[in-house]
């Protein structure tokens, strides 16, 4: 592990194994912090903005790309080096993975067709993509940012969590198949499905039944189920469950609410039901989870 200090900021670089490292960047100040790192074209870059916001600057300042909170950015370009020049907003956290393309190929050699930029089509091209951070990914990011372990097992823990993060990142709906799906070609249908997602999140404490939801958005129950799975990669209630547990986890970490209050806010009438749900998702009780986080 190496702590690096830059003139206007600092970040921690953790070497996972050959060709693979983590960058943990935390700006707790009230001013923008800047940091940079030389990264050549033989590396992939995964950036996850956990809170606040970041701006990536390319080509001697001629081009900039904003990365808002709860979004990720993948950078891949075999033609030019992409040195990391980043501005981190006040009170922002970001975690990045830097992995050699050779290492990445070794992980996904049997899944080349599943990963777009491993295909022949992208072999000599650049590939940038920005995605929302899903609730399962948010959990792993939190674990990577906050852990309190014996030094003898820290390396093993980090390696396991990083591989879990990469696996979850690529656990997405096959976008090519989705684009070819006749249902998703209809923009109106997609709008209705997105509205369904907004409705269940707005009313997560008392969500409507699937039939009531389909009636409200003006789509048949069958199309609601199929469309939601195609766009969000999960069933309506499983997606909602993940979201509720993520919200609960974040509320608990603030230390502003007790377990019963958090449970009520995400729709559980009794603390026992909430604790059971939390344990189903995270494998531990809310209290033990906070203890493991050192809170």
Image: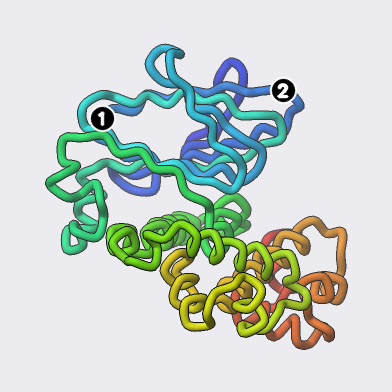
Do we see residue 291 in this rendering?
A: no
Residue under pointer 1: 41
Is 126 placed above or below 260 here?
above
Across and down, in percent, residue 101 comes to 24, 42
1 or 2: tag closer to the N-terminus = 2
Residues under labels 1 and 2: Cα distance? 31 Å
Q: Is residue 83 left or right of residue 271?
A: left
Toward the viewer: 19 or 151? 19
Task: Give the number of callouts.
Answer: 2
Toward the viewer: 4 or 162? 162
Q: Quadrant of residue 276?
A: bottom right
- Residue at left 50%, top 56%? 154
Do we see residue 82 in this rendering?
A: yes
Q: Residues within 10 Å of mark 2 (few under 14, many from 20)?
A: few
- Taking the view exactly as shown, the residue that stands out farthest to the left is 120
Toward the viewer: 153 or 27? 27
Toward the viewer: 160 or 174? 174
Q: Residues within 10 Å of mark 1 (few under 14, many from 20)?
A: some
- Residue at left 49%, top 71%? 228
**SS under mark 2:** loop
- In the rendered structure, find residue 84 and report the number of the disc placed on it: none
- Residue at left 17%, top 50%? 119
Across and down, in percent, residue 211 comes to 62, 85
Q: Is residue 109 left or right of residue 172?
A: left
Q: Quadrant of residue 231?
A: bottom left
Residue under pointer 2: 31
**SS under mark 1:** loop
Is 270 placed above or below 168 here?
below
């Amino acid at each position: 592990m190496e702590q690096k200090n830059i003139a206007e900021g600092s970040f921690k670089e953790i070497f996972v194994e050959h060709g693979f490292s983590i960058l943990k960047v935390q700006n707790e100040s009230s001013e923008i912090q800047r940091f940079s790192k030389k990264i050549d074209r033989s590396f992939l870059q995964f950036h996850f903005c956990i809170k606040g916001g970041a701006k990536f600057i390319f080509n001697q300042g001629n081009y900039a790309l904003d990365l808002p909170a709860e979004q990720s950015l993948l950078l891949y370009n075999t033609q030019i080096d992409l040195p990391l020049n980043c501005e981190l907003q006040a009170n922002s956290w970001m975690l990045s993975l830097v992995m050699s393309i050779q290492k990445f190929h070794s992980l996904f050699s049997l899944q080349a067709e599943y990963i777009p930029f491993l295909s022949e089509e992208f072999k000599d091209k650049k590939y940038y993509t920005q995605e929302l951070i899903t609730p399962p990914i948010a959990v792993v990011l939190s674990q990577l940012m906050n852990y309190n372990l014996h030094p003898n097992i820290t390396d093993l823990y980090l390696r396991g969590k990083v591989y879990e993060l990469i696996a979850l990142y690529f656990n997405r709906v096959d976008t090519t198949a989705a684009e070819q799906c006749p249902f998703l070609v209809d923009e109106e249908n997609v709008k209705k499905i997105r509205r369904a997602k907004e409705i269940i999140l707005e009313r997560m404490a008392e969500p409507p039944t699937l039939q009531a939801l389909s009636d409200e958005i003006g789509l048949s129950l069958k199309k609601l189920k199929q469309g939601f799975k195609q766009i969000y990669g999960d069933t309506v209630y499983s997606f909602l469950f993940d979201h509720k547990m993520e919200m609960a986890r974040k509320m608990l970490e603030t230390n502003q609410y007790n377990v019963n209050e958090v449970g009520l806010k995400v729709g559980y009438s009794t603390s026992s039901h909430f604790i059971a749900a939390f344990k189903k998702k995270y494998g531990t009780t809310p209290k033990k989870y906070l203890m493991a986080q050192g809170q």
